[in-house]
Image: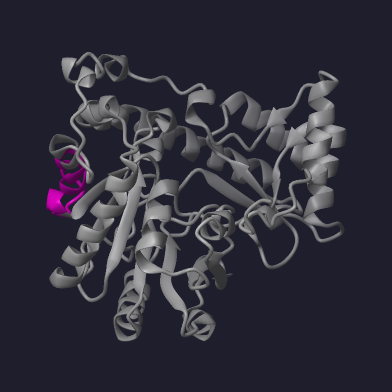
Amino acid sequence: MFSSRFHWDFRPNRLTRLLNERRAAGDPILDLTESNPTHAGIEYPPEIVRAFADPRVLVYDPAPAGAPEAREAVAAYYAARGVPVDPGRILLTASTSEAYAYLFKLLADPGDEVLVPRPSYPLFEYLAGMESLQVRQYPLRYHGGWSMDLEALSDALSPRTRAVILVNPNNPTGSYLKQPELEMLSRLCARRGMALISDEVFSDYALAPDPRRAPTLAGVEECLAFSMSGLSKVAGLPQMKLGWIVAAGPPALRTEAMERLEWIADTYLSVGTPVQCAAGRLLAAGAEAQRRIRERAAANLAHARAVLAGSAATVLAVEGGWYVTVQMPRIRSEEEWALELLASRGVLTQPGFFYDFESEAFLVLSVLTAPEIFREGVARLRGMV
């Protein structure tokens, strides 16, 4: 009766069952997985609320690619980062998840493939599956720092590969794409007629500068490329539901892509008028929330490194984003570590297999977590190792 897209096991995993049991019993839980800034005690500037005091929010004037003023606000965001982007290359969406759906519709037919990094964002299989696409993975390797295995990526290509997806910086490894990697990928995609898709929602959360990085694909010229981001992370405002796609690459190909994307967007017209009217002010006011999130992330990361130094748990190198990966002793699986931490210490973490880590045993912690919760949780983790 239902679509074959829904081929996943809907039963909760062991960690979710244990979490539900503890919550039902009223047991206190130190949640080190918090990814929602509106639940993390971040103080937001009052200008965000005032940004919606605009009479234009009462008028519906649909524009498939997005309201010109909102697209100009996004262009100004890139200009402030030294990347000139014509508003005509920007298409607004309700979220980056919707942006993925639009791009998959644009680039691929049912049964085609997209390449995604491993470890990385756990929703790729679902997003691709909803468009009847197949996911193939290419590995990120850790040798004191994370890097793409470009040879393995090349080996993973097939005649049905339509796009290579980057998460820049990666979630959860926090590793950025480097310029030599981008150059090789651009040549490869141009030669094979594939597109590059770069999810850059955490791009503003670098822990330190690094001239080797390629923080955005918005300036790529050699192959068709798409950069995605949105207010959810850029301004710490996931509830505002505004994302965007920036098209880059050879002008003729880029123009045709934008025309087709606008056609797709016109079918749905999903982006709300109020958030488009407020976009410029939200981006400006959100910069303060972003600063506070960066400070918290840096402080929590430094604390985790200090507390776990000299223990059997190792904090892996991270360049940016909201997460930190901790390598645990292999005396038990990462699932067993996560279950034991929750059962005996009341600490919630994410096991690495949630992100498709290839080996054991890793736990992923959110450095967005409120400091008092993060510190106590890390102290209890240290007590176990």
Q: How is the image coloured?
A: one colour
Query: Residue 133: x percent and y percent?
Result: 52, 66
**Residue shown at the point (14%, 35%) measured from the top left:** 69
Q: How many marks?
A: 0
Please report the residue visible at 29 percent of the width from the left and 81 percent of the height from the top.
190
Q: Position of residue 117 (x, y in %)?
A: 52, 66
Name the foreground residue: 332 vs 109: 109
Whether residue 281 is visible, yes or no, is no
* In the displayed structure image, the side of residue 52 where residue 17 appears, left or right: right
**Image coordinates for residue 340, horizontal then vertical, percent:** 85, 42
- 243 left or right of 139? left
**Is the residue 264 above or below the residue 142 in the image?**
above
Q: Is residue 364 left or right of residue 227?
A: right
**Residue 41 forms part of the magenta stretch:** no
Q: Is residue 27 above or below residue 296?
A: above
In front here: 355 or 311? 355
Left or right: 20 with respect to 157? right
**Residue 247 makes an appearance in the image:** yes
Residue 319 position by quadrant: bottom left
Name the residue rendered at 37%, 54% in the picture. Answer: 102
Query: Is residue 85 one of those drawn in magenta?
Result: yes
The residue sitting at 26% across, 14% down in the picture is 50
Locate residue 114, reporting x and y percent.
48, 70
Magenta span: 72-88
Q: Is residue 77 above or below residue 147?
A: above
